[in-house]
Image (cartoon, rainbow, N blue to C red):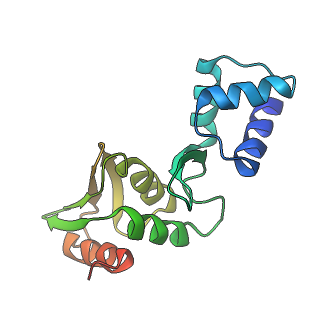
Amino acid sequence: MKRRRQQALLELVRAESLASQEEIAARLERLGLPATQSTISRDLDELGLVRVRDTAGHLRYGSPDGGTSNGVRHIRSLLREFARSVEHSRNLVLVKTPPAGAMPVARALDSAEVEGVMGTVAGDDTIIVVVREDVRARDVAASLRSIAGLS
């Protein structure tokens, strides 16, 4: 049942613009796959689905890499849309975004395994990017600024 529900969930978020877990629950119910909010929340997490902005700027559930194997293209799109500034200090890079913009960008950076990036920590509008010891944060920041069109 879980596998079938998760497959249906993946198909739903690819086909429709679903902005809330309540909408997802209603669609699953219509498919004969009732699920509680906590079950849907776990499924979303296990499937790596997050709330992302669509081309119209509305939040909806989707894959942080845009459903493509080319996460770089998605990171470019996210950084150009959300990054307001990129600064560095020692082995950290700080990326500022508008409110609610940090999580999708951080998730994409982590998923795409960007060279030199060990991991990210995201708040509402700020991302801390931890840079690997053998890489200069200045270089990672310059690369992110260039991708974001901030150079």
Quadrant for residue 144, please give it: bottom left
Q: Could you say which is closer to the camera, residue 24 or residue 58?
A: 58
Q: Which residue lies most toward the right here?
A: 32
> How many numbered discs?
0
Across and down, in percent, residue 138 comes to 19, 74
Above or below 150: residue 109: above
Quadrant location of the N terminus? Answer: top right
Quadrant location of the C terminus? Answer: bottom left
Residue drawn at 83 percent across, 32 percent down? 4
Across and down, in percent, residue 29 comes to 80, 22
Above or below 132: residue 27: above
Residue drawn at 56 percent across, 62 percent down? 55
Q: Is residue 146 visible?
A: yes
Across and down, in percent, residue 88 comes to 16, 66
Quadrant for residue 78, please give it: bottom left
Residue drawn at 58 percent across, 39 percent down? 19
Residue drawn at 36 percent across, 74 percent down? 148
**Left of 30 or right of it: where is 93?**
left
Q: Is residue 1 visible?
A: no
**Left of 113 or right of it: where is 70?**
right
Across and down, in percent, residue 70 comes to 60, 70
**Left of 18 or right of it: where is 144?**
left
**Left of 88 or right of it: where is 151?**
right
Q: Which residue lies most toward the left here?
A: 89
Q: Could you say which is closer to the camera, residue 68 or residue 79?
A: 79
